[in-house]
Image (tube, helix red, strand yellow):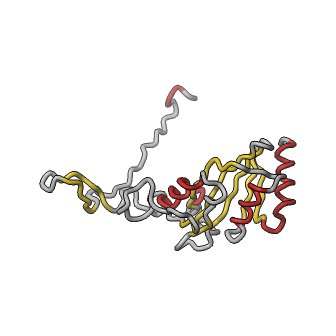
Amino acid sequence: MTASVQTLKAAVEQAFGEAVRELKLERGELTLTVRAADYPQVALRLRDDDSLHFEQLIDLCGLDYSDYRNRPWEGLRFCVVSHLLSVKHNWRLRLKVFAVDDDMPAVASVTPIWNAANWFEREAFDLYGIVFEGHEDLRRILTDYGFIGHPMRKDFPVSGHVEMRYDPETRRVIYQPVTIEPRENTPRVVREDQYGGLH
């Protein structure tokens, strides 16, 4: 554990106090989890406080915690994770916030704070259905505008809801219900004692 990460941990604890829901130091990386209500103020202070100075957002993504680690998840389902960089202090920080409503997940947009979040938030909205309140152009970015559902959610069917194909009669691409039969593949397990020359 380096002194630099310990210095960052102390600075975060001092800056946010009660706003810290969880502060975890694992494998030399610091993860700060905050409540959705505190998220915009914490993000702004992370950027503007000279003792922290996280001027760059490197990445932002959505997560679906249902069935986390192949076990039922007890807490809130949808999470937004941001990876921040302070060039000034040579620090990295992971910032996590959980959406309070699993049926309509929403958190504040950090695009006004770090404009690099724009397309990342659109991707999390498209793939997970997380709404970023205050985002000026929240629309799908990877799937078609007519796409139904959010394909990275763990309850989204692997084959999807519809398929598209080119129809030579109408000379255009059309949507139709999925024609693939659902099936479950069971992998073959090799149980030979001498398999691969191992004893």
| Residue 121 spot, x, y in % from top left | 55, 58
Residues 193 and 12: in front is: 12
The mark tally for this picture is: 0
Which part of the image, by quadrant, shows the N terminus? top right
Residue 87 appears at what percent x and percent y? 75, 42
At x 77%, y 45%, the residue is 91
Going 73% across and 65% down the picture, which residue do you hit? 41
Front one among 163 and 189: 163
The C terminus - image quarter: top right
**Placement of 108 over or under 118, stated as above or below:** below
Q: Residue at x 27, y 62 (%)?
A: 177
Q: Residue furthest left?
A: 169
Q: Which residue is at a point 63% across and 60% down the rendered structure image?
A: 112
Q: Is residue 33 left or right of residue 172?
A: right
Does 125 sit left or right of 116 as displayed? Answer: left
- Nearer to us in this view, 160 or 113: 113
Q: Where in the figure is residue 54, as x and y percent of width and height?
A: 74, 50
Q: Is residue 30 above or below residue 147?
A: above
Task: Indicate the quadrant where residue 63 lies.
Answer: bottom right
Report the side of 127 relative to 107 (left or right).
left
Q: Name, please, the residue furthest toward the top.
A: 197
Image location of residue 18, percent across then percent down: 82, 68
Quarter of the rendering containing residue 134: bottom right
